[in-house]
Amino acid sequence: MRFSINIPNFGDFADPRNVAKVAVAAEEAGWDGLFVWDHVVHDKSKRQGQPFGDPWMLLTAAALATSQVRLGTLVTPVARRRPQQLARQVATLDELSGGRMIFGAGLGGPVDDEYGSFGEPTDPVVLAERLDEGLDLLARYWSGEPVTHDGRHFQVQDVTLLPATRQQPRPPVWVGGYWPNRRPMRRAARWDGVVPLFADARHGVVPSVEQVRDVVAYIGKEAPFDVVVGGATSPAEAPDVAGAMAEAGATWWDERQLQASADLHRLTPVLRRVEQGPPTSVQ
């Protein structure tokens, strides 16, 4: 099992220098990954007045400050991005980091705030179509081969985006979605990993072992396919929690702050937990 730190891209973490501090501390303490959120406004009623940072700028700062820790977004809402621009950003970061990029993708939300606020479509069917079509385009762009595409939502005429990603055939793609919804799980099974979310275990709440086991059984894929679950733990309880998740089939434990906590977007408490280190005794 591998271990990562998960932080939002707002509050103290809107500052790339703070994200670099977390990345350095994570690498020194033995964590395997650092993942940041990809939001524009998140929940406007809760985040009013808070600064937000662009996730690719934040990850650039983290990449420049480290040499080993894996980096990525959890998750990028592909449906509100232009695939060609997103492909460039990911390829550039994969090169800069020496091939340490992991790309987390999903629908993103809250939909009314993150999409509707800017006049973007909010129909979940349309967003799912754009996500699937966008992911397929990203993989083709990252190959460095010519792309021509005439789809429902995107058109491309004989374009080759270079350089290709450092990792080939592409950086790992993890797909997020709410269990027990089946469609996001089937989507994830087409790629390299799943980041299941649970309605009764919101961000930072440790999910039940039974639900994780159900996700693993439904997807039915073995390593190197990744199953990424997380929550907020203390150093004392982390080995037991992560160990139980590993036995259920999870391959990454993603340490998170509770979404309802005032510490969610504050540097000091996050750094404190990072410096306490991962439960490395879990196999």
Image: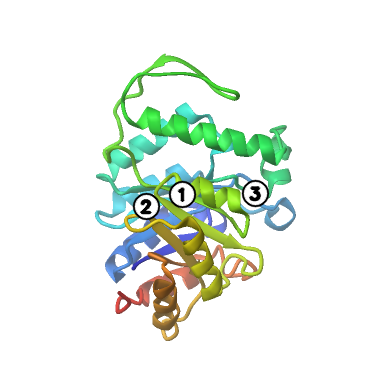
Taking 81 as reference, is 187 above or below it?
below
As rendered, which of 59 and 128 lies closer to the eye?
Answer: 128
Indicate the amino acid at tag 2. Answer: Leu
Q: Secondary structure at mark 3?
A: loop
**Of the numbered discs in the image, which one, if any, rests on residue 100?**
none
Is the residue marked by circle 1 packed among few (<14), some (14-19), or many (20+) residues within 10 Å?
Answer: some
Q: Quadrant of residue 273?
A: bottom left
Residue 206 can be seen in this image: no
Dot in front, 1 or 2: 1
Mark 1 or 2, nearer chain start: 2
Residue bearing the label numbered 3: 109
Q: Quadrant of the C terminus?
A: bottom left
Indicate the amino acid at tag 1. Answer: Ala
Residue bearing the label numbered 1: 189
Q: What's the CA distance linking mark 2 and mark 3?
A: 21 Å
Residue lying at 51% horizontally and 75% vertically, measured from the top left: 209
Residue bearing the label numbered 2: 71
